[in-house]
Image: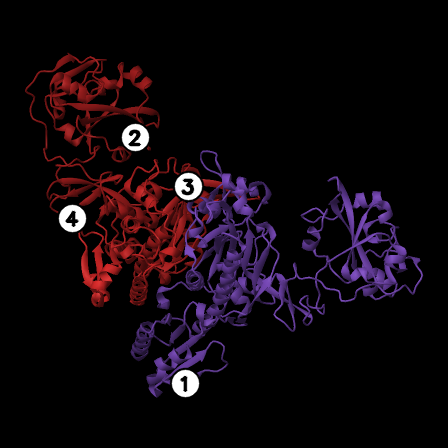
Chain colours: A purple, B red
């Protein structure tokens, strides 16, 4: 590509709404432009990277035996009504009507459509396992689209769906997909981790997310420092090695704690370590007669509640919701800041303590009376009927749940997610095949997503410096830039540039020849901002000496190379 | 690809709603499935063809210097309001609202979005000309989607848009695009014609359509039998070589024509040749004070009105609309079947005769009195104040408008359309660049569309037989099928098939190895239905003789080839 025929659209400054690095750099490097909230045009530089990611994903999916299809983006409501998701899916599902008033949605995912296809096209166990993928535009009407293409409303996903007789076959394909995903991220050259994850609104029993590690990640990933255990913090089990509480050594005392609205304030006021306090939260639940009630959750003062774990407790309403303050005051007689476990059971309220809270002794907790707390509280002596569960987020230093080492937490950007869906969609849509005995069997399903557009942003979050992007070679918009000094004026420069351009292109490299009438500083800055890995500068001074100036994007210094060696030099660097 | 891992989904019968061959064959060959009216999933066989078309289109666009981008499918209403198309575009534009109640549409085309991009990114004449393309999913809410992917609601288009200072630069890029389109259709191997065309709702001054010739085409294309003249019948000029009418030889006579509601009936009843009759139609118009009125159009009895030509006449309302019957009866005093030109001017009605009608003499026409016609009518003698215009469709045998030869009409499927848009969109969106003198200039624009999904269907309409599809080699789903006889039972067959499969794949061929446990007849029928150009049959009987059986999809007979020569034989056939 000759720069004089190319659209750079590089900018000195990022727009004010761009708060993460990848968003800033993608706009500044002329990769994307927003046309409306969460809707982006991919400019030539952005699309070149996008296509390279797309091609790696397609290639690995094909190698893994998945068959490519394309399903419509506009999906009929009837299919979503069959699975019940037309009602259940929130406002992220953009619903619309056609000219005849029929209901459709813009597909945020394709379980319904593919399962409908499978029930029509797959009839015999002989056809299975079968795995389909598509690379397709999705729409999710995010309430707050942000971070550029990282959380846009329209985006590109590779989604795959596999069909099986039996869970064993599903597990086999799941493992193949797990490996294919590792291959994709290895080939792109990203530092990533597969982690155990919650299955969320897609459902299913077993799932892994693939995270690109980056400080700007939205997710917390818990790792073991001594094994390959890795899980999204949503899911990572919080283990407590201590088996039971020590015997009480203090008497219970009611103390005045004025204006202490948080457990941190209470600890500070009473000069206690926060780890010797508990906090008690009341959340909405249903009793055995399905009537609304509240449940108390008790955590050590320094721990944080894990809403996903709580939602899985029997009786607790999902999605997670705190009890209304008015109900708390009515039932307990104090504001939420003074709630504690003592006496709740007597009022008919279930008390569920986190594993780590349940082994505490001589602790401090709310006295269920405004502005008062207890100290010297002990479970067995002072509180009735306790349930114990894992309801908190793991923290650094926790023992790893696999028994090896302790937990370290890093931030990650989710770029892939694979699920064992089991039979839920196939059951809802009655997708069966005949087995070896001629009996109809509901198929088992897996689903496997990769955020193609999101990978582009995640790669930047992991690879940038103050000058711009540091692309992995596999997905750089150009492999090499030839920067011409005075291309218009110097015939020698022009001839050498044209020769290098033709020869490097003939070797299969994606070459940018910067033949623009711009100052060298502008050209170098564009090269660096765009993150082109290799750069050759061609100028009259060097040509007189028989040299070109080479610089790798990540190297500090230029080096002079002999003209005659240039092509081999570059090919060796690749 | 091994057939045992592939999804065939071939069907013996086409669905009853499939009325055109390509739709029938695409469903039967397992290329597409409808999930809702006008919404299709592309199955693996269909998508393989689709991708081959897409890649040829992309390659030729890049060679022609166009830069690939991707714009969103969901477009904000504001841009369409700026050009006025939010109001003007009919119900084919699917309008929708997001969760915040903001208006959007599903893009049927992208003039607004690209012009918005251009006004932001293009600032100087130095950047021009600039040509962008995308290969993207479009949505048009067709009132009656039909013919499979030929007229579906969701479809894939390559659309390109070029930006220029001045009409001359636009013409240069237009010519480059014209050639690129020819390259695309030549490479695919289709019998096509570029034809002059009307610019329709996209607007602009100058345009060509690219038509694949096929009997099932929706468009009539007029060609010269002796030159390269070709135009859509909507646009082709109807020339009349006769300069004026002959002198009258008959007296005018009013004749009773009971129950003759059409001109054909009148001619039959009066035993006249229909070419000596005229038909007179009244259409809605506005007078010089912009008040509703009607205008009379007179054509020779065997000619058909061309609505697009009529819409361009001054005063006539666009879109074309016939006058209401009640108005006709009120103003003329008879039903539409008895209207004729004599006496209309006296009633204040403009009479516009087609060129061919205007040179007739001694003709028959309605007498403006129910069930009566005139014979022996002559213009100058009997009718006042006549306007003459080209208002009919050309017919076979008409002189070619370029003066060379006569017109032949063939049916075509429109697969591409290029337009010189001029400045209308750039003016509406204030898209300017600074010229050499630092003065703001409104850009000139071209736009260039190819229906990627439609090409797949059009290629079938032109290439099929009673057994199935006859793909051009360039876009066949597989280059060659190796049909194994008893792959599961015969080790010799298995070894030879696996060898051929590996070697042909290594030569870069797209190979289908049919290793299924199916009867040979089923495998042959699938091969033929899918239209795979080359077929090798591997069986024990042949192997004993040292031969394989080769058949080209279009050949009548099989031929035996020596195993040792097989690879070279196939490569020579390609």
Disc 3 from disc 2: Cα separation: 22 Å
Q: Secondary structure at mark 1?
A: strand
Residue marked by disc 4: B228
Residue marked by disc 2: B316
Name the image quarter holding the C terminus of chain B.
bottom left
Please tell me whether mark 1 or mark 2 is closer to you in this view.
1
> Dot 1: within a 10 Å radius of its alpha carbon, few (fewer than 14), some, or many (20 or more) residues?
some
- Residue B164 showing in the rendered view: no
- Cβ atoms at labels 2 and 4 below 8 Å apart: no
* Residues indicated by labels 4 and 3 sit on the same polypeptide chain: yes
* Residues indicated by labels 1 and 2 sit on the same polypeptide chain: no
Please tell me whether mark 4 or mark 3 is closer to you in this view.
4
Q: Position of residue A298 (x, y in %)?
A: 79, 56
- Residue B296 showing in the rendered view: yes
Disc 1 from disc 2: Cα separation: 74 Å
Q: Is residue A99 left or right of residue B151?
A: right
Q: Quadrant of residue A239?
A: bottom right
Q: Secondary structure at mark 4?
A: loop
- Cβ atoms at labels 4 and 3 below 8 Å apart: no
Sequence-first tag of 3 and 2: 3
Q: Nearer the viewer, residue A120 or A357?
A: A120
Q: Position of residue B182 (x, y in %)?
A: 24, 54
* Residues indicated by labels 2 and 4 sit on the same polypeptide chain: yes
> Dot 2: within a 10 Å radius of its alpha carbon, few (fewer than 14), some, or many (20 or more) residues?
many
Q: Position of residue A394 (x, y in %)?
A: 70, 63
> Dot 3: within a 10 Å radius of its alpha carbon, few (fewer than 14), some, or many (20 or more) residues?
some
Q: In the rendering, which numbered label is found on residue A560? A: 1
Sequence-first tag of 4 and 3: 3
Residue marked by disc 3: B85
Residue B567 lies, with reference to residue B366, above or below; the image says: below
């Amino acid at each position: 590509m000759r720069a004089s025929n190319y659209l750079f659209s590089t900018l000195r400054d990022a727009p004010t709404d761009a708060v993460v690095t990848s968003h800033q750099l993608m706009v500044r490097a002329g990769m994307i432009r927003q046309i409306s909230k969460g809707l982006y045009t991919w400019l030539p530089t952005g699309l070149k990277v996008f296509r390279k990611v797309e091609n790696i994903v397609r290639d690995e999916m094909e190698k893994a035996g998945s068959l490519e299809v394309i399903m419509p983006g506009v999906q009929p409501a009837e299919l979503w009504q069959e699975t019940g998701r037309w009602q259940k899916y929130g406002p992220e599902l953009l619903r619309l009507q056609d000219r005849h008033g029929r209901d459709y949605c813009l597909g945020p995912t394709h379980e319904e459509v593919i399962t409908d296809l499978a029930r029509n096209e797959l009839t015999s166990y002989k056809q299975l396992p079968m795995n389909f993928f598509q690379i397709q535009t999705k729409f999710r009407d995010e309430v707050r689209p942000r971070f550029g293409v990282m959380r846009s409303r329209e985006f590109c996903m590779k989604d795959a769906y596999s069909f099986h007789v039996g869970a064993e076959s599903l597990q086999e394909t799941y493992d193949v997909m797990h490996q294919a995903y590792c291959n994709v991220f290895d080939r792109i050259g990203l530092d990533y981790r597969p982690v155990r994850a919650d299955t969320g609104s897609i459902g299913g029993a077993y799932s892994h997310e693939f995270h690109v590690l980056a400080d700007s990640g939205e997710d917390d990933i818990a790792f073991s420092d001594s094994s390959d255990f890795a899980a999204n913090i949503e899911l990572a089990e919080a283990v407590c090695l201590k088996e039971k509480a020590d015997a009480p050594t203090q008497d219970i005392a009611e103390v005045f704690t004025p204006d202490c609205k948080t457990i941190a304030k209470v600890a500070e006021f009473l000069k206690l370590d926060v780890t010797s306090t508990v906090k008690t939260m009341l959340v909405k639940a249903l009793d055995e007669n399905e009537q609304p009630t509240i449940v108390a959750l008790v955590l050590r003062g320094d721990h944080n509640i894990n809403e996903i774990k709580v939602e899985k407790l029997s009786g607790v309403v999902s999605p997670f919701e705190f009890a209304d303050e008015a109900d708390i005051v009515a039932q307990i007689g104090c504001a939420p800041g003074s709630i504690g476990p003592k006496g709740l059971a007597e009022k008919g309220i279930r008390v569920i303590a986190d594993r780590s809270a349940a082994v505490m002794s001589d602790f401090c907790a709310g006295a269920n009376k405004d502005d008062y707390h207890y100290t010297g509280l002990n479970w067995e002596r002072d509180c009735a009927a306790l349930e114990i569960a894992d309801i908190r987020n793991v923290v650094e230093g926790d023992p790893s749940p696999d028994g090896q080492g302790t937990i370290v937490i890093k931030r990650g950007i989710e770029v892939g997610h694979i699920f064992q869906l089991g039979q839920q969609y196939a059951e809802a849509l009655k997708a069966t095949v005949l087995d070896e005995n001629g009996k109809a069997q509901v198929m088992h399903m897996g689903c496997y997503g990769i955020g193609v557009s999101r990978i582009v942003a995640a790669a930047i979050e992991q690879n940038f410096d103050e000058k711009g992007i540091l692309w992995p070679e596999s997905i750089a918009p150009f492999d090499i830039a030839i920067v011409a000094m005075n291309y218009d004026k110097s015939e020698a420069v022009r001839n050498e540039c044209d020769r290098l351009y033709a020869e490097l292109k003939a070797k299969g490299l994606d070459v940018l020849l910067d033949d623009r009438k711009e100052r060298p500083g502008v050209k170098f800055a564009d090269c660096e901002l765009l993150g082109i890995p290799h750069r050759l500068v061609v100028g009259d001074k060097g040509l007189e000496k028989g040299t070109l100036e080479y610089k790798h994007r990540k190297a500090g210094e230029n080096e002079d190379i002999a003209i005659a060696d240039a092509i081999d030099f570059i090919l060796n660097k690749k």
